[in-house]
Image (tube, rainbow, N blue to C red):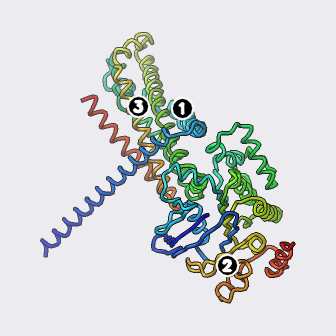
C-alpha cells in the first residue's frame, strides 16, 4: 500500500515535471517563431510600408526610451550613491581607484543592465502587453487583418526594434548617471577631484565592458518585447485576460532577462 | 466570386457554424439574418476567422491557404466594418482611414488626404478628424470605420450591423451610400443586420441562419414569404427603427420603384 502510494507520487511528479518541461519548450519555440517572423517582416517591407513601420518604431523609442529617462536617471543616480556609501561603511579607507573599479564592476557589468531591464519591464513591457491585449479584445487586431496589414509587422516588429534601440541606449545612460551618482558621494567623502575620478574610471573600464553591456541590453530588449507582445497576443476574447497576461509578461520577461544575464556573465567574465 | 464550401467553425466545444456552403457574386448584396453565428460567418467570409474545416475562396483561391503576401493582396480587395467599429485607439480618426492607403498604396500625402476626405464627404462625416476615436460616440466611430472599409474601393464589403447604434441621420446615409454603391459599382456586400429597412432596401438575397446552419437562402420576397415557421419567427422578430411601415409594404415600395 505504502509502496503503491510512493510510486503514485513519483509518477505524478514525473508527469508534472514532464508537462512543465514540454510547456516551457513550447513557450520558447513560440517566442522564437515570433522573433523570427518579426525579423523577416522587417526585411520584407515595401518602401512605402517602411514609413508606417518606422513611424511606429519611433513612437516606441519615444515611449520606452525618452519617456523613461526620468525614472532611469533617478534609480541609477541613487544606486551609484548607495554603492559608494555602503563601500565607505565597509572600507573607510577606500581610495579613488577602488571607487572607480567598484562602480564599473557593480553598475556597468551587472546591476546597470539588469536594473534597466526591470524598469523597462515595469514601464514598457506591461504597457505593451496591456495595449496588445486590449487591441485583441476590441477587435483592432482583427481590423488589421481585414485591411491586409500583418499585425506582426505593424505591431510586434516596431516594438522589437524600439525596445532593442531604447534598451541599448538606456543601458549606457544608466551606467553614466550611476557612475556620476557614485562620484558625487566620493567627492563629498574624500574630496575626489573629477579629473582623477575620470582617469581612474578610464583605467577600470574595459572596452569589452561597453560592448558586452550593449549586447546584453539588446538581448534584454528582445526578451522583454517578445514576451510582452506574445502574452498580449494570447488574449482571446475577455478583458479579464488582459491583467493575467500582463502579469505573465512581467514574470516571463524577468525570467528571460536573468537567463540571458547569467549566460553573458558566464560567457564573458569566467 | 466568393464561395464557401462545407465551412465548420467552433469555439472550444461549441459549434458556431456547421456545413455552411454559399456563393456571393460580384455586385450582389447578400444579407445574413437569424440566430447566433452571423458575425462569425461574416468574419470567416472576410478572411479574419479561419474555419476548422471547409474552404473560403475568392475567385477560386482559398484565402486561408495562401502565403502572407497573397493574403495581404486579397484582403485589400475587401473592406470590413466591425459591429463595434474597431478603430485603432492610438491613431486619430483621419489616420485610421488613411492607414490602408499609407500601407498599401504608393500615394502622396496630398492624394491620401484627398481620398480620405472624399470618403468622409460621401458619408457626410464632418468631425475634427485629428482627434482619437475615444472622444467620439459609437455612432461617429462606426461611420469612420465604414469610411475605412470603403477607402480602398473594395470589391467586397463585409458589414456587421452597419446601422446598429448609429443615429437616424447616419443610418439614412449608410443605406443611401449602400444603394449608391449597389447601383453604380461592381462591389458586392455581405451585410449582417437586424434592420428590416436596410435588408429590404438593399438585399438581392437573404440567408437565414439557425443553429449554425443555413435554413433559408433566397430572394427577399422568398424569405419574407417563407413557409418555414423558424424563418417567419426570425423575420418577425427583427426590430426596426421605422415600425410605422411593415416590411412587406417597404418591399412592395422598393419593387415599385425598381419598375421602369
B112 displayed left or right of A191? right
Q: Quadrant of residue B138?
A: bottom right
Across and down, in percent, residue A4 comes to 15, 73
Q: Secondary structure at mark 1?
A: helix
Q: Which residue is mark 1?
A: A69
Earlier sequence position, callout 1 versus callout 3: 1
Q: Which quadrant would residue A26 be assigned to in this image?
A: bottom left
Taking the spot 30% from the left edge, 37% from the top edge, the residue there is: A262
Are the residues at dot 1 and dot 2 in contact (C-beta closer than 8 Å)? no
Spatial CA span between label 1 and label 3? 14 Å
Q: Residue at x 79, y 49 (%)?
A: B127
Identify residue for label 3. Answer: A112
Determine if marks 1 and 3 fall on one subunit. yes
Q: Quadrant of the C terminus of chain B?
A: bottom right
Q: Quadrant of the N terminus of chain B?
A: bottom right
Residue A104 x/y as whole percent: 36, 23
Check the residue under mark 1 and report the chain it is in.
A
Density class for disc 2 (Cα within 10 Å; few <14, some 14-19, many ≥20) is some
C-alpha distance separating marks 3 and 2: 69 Å
Amino acid at each position: 500500500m505504502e509502496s503503491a502510494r510512493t510510486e503514485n507520487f513519483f509518477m505524478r511528479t514525473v508527469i508534472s515535471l514532464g508537462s512543465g518541461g514540454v510547456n516551457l519548450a513550447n513557450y520558447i519555440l513560440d517566442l522564437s517563431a515570433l522573433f523570427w517572423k518579426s525579423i523577416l517582416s522587417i526585411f520584407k517591407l515595401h518602401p512605402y510600408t517602411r514609413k508606417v513601420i518606422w513611424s511606429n518604431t519611433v513612437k516606441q523609442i519615444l515611449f520606452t526610451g525618452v519617456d523613461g529617462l526620468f525614472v532611469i536617471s533617478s534609480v541609477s543616480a541613487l544606486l551609484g550613491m548607495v554603492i559608494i556609501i555602503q563601500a565607505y561603511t565597509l572600507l573607510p579607507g577606500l581610495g579613488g581607484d577602488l571607487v572607480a573599479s567598484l562602480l564599473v564592476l557593480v553598475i556597468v557589468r551587472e546591476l546597470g543592465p539588469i536594473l534597466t531591464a526591470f524598469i523597462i519591464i515595469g514601464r514598457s513591457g506591461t504597457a505593451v502587453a496591456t495595449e496588445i491585449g486590449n487591441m485583441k479584445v476590441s477587435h483592432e487586431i482583427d481590423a488589421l487583418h481585414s485591411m491586409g496589414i500583418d499585425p506582426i509587422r505593424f505591431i510586434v516588429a516596431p516594438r522589437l526594434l524600439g525596445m532593442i534601440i531604447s534598451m541599448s541606449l538606456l543601458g549606457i545612460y544608466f551606467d553614466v548617471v550611476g557612475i556620476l551618482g557614485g562620484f558625487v558621494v566620493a567627492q563629498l567623502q574624500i574630496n575626489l577631484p573629477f579629473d582623477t575620478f575620470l582617469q581612474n574610471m578610464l583605467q577600470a573600464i574595459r572596452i569589452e565592458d561597453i560592448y558586452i553591456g550593449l549586447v546584453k541590453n539588446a538581448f534584454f530588449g528582445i526578451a522583454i518585447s517578445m514576451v510582452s507582445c506574445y502574452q498580449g497576443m494570447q488574449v482571446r476574447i475577455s478583458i479579464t485576460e488582459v491583467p493575467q497576461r500582463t502579469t505573465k509578461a512581467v514574470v516571463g520577461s524577468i525570467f528571460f532577462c536573468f537567463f540571458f544575464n547569467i549566460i553573458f556573465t558566464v560567457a564573458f567574465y569566467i | 466570386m466568393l464561395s464557401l464550401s462545407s465551412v465548420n467553425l467552433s469555439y472550444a466545444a461549441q459549434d458556431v457554424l456547421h456545413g455552411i456552403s454559399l456563393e456571393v457574386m460580384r455586385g450582389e448584396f447578400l444579407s445574413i439574418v437569424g440566430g447566433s453565428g452571423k458575425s462569425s460567418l461574416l468574419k470567416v467570409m472576410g478572411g479574419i476567422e479561419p474555419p476548422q474545416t471547409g474552404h473560403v475562396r475568392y475567385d477560386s483561391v482559398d484565402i486561408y491557404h495562401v502565403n502572407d503576401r497573397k493574403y495581404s493582396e486579397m484582403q485589400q480587395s475587401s473592406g470590413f466594418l466591425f459591429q463595434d467599429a474597431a478603430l485603432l485607439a492610438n491613431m486619430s480618426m483621419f489616420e485610421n482611414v488613411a492607414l490602408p492607403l499609407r500601407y498599401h498604396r504608393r500615394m502622396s500625402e496630398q492624394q491620401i488626404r484627398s481620398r480620405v476626405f472624399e470618403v468622409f464627404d460621401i458619408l457626410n462625416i464632418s468631425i475634427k478628424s485629428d482627434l482619437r476615436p475615444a472622444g467620439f460616440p459609437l455612432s461617429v466611430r462606426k461611420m469612420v470605420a465604414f469610411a475605412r472599409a470603403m477607402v480602398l474601393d473594395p470589391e467586397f464589403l463585409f458589414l456587421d450591423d452597419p446601422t446598429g447604434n448609429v443615429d437616424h441621420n447616419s443610418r439614412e446615409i449608410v443605406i443611401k451610400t449602400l444603394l449608391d454603391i449597389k447601383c453604380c459599382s461592381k462591389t458586392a456586400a455581405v451585410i449582417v443586420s437586424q434592420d428590416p429597412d436596410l435588408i429590404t432596401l438593399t438585399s438581392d438575397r437573404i440567408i437565414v441562419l439557425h443553429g449554425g446552419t443555413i435554413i433559408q437562402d433566397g430572394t427577399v420576397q422568398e424569405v419574407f414569404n417563407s413557409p418555414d415557421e423558424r424563418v417567419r419567427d426570425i423575420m418577425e422578430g427583427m426590430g426596426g427603427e421605422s415600425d410605422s411601415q411593415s416590411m412587406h409594404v417597404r418591399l412592395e415600395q422598393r419593387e415599385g420603384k425598381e419598375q421602369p
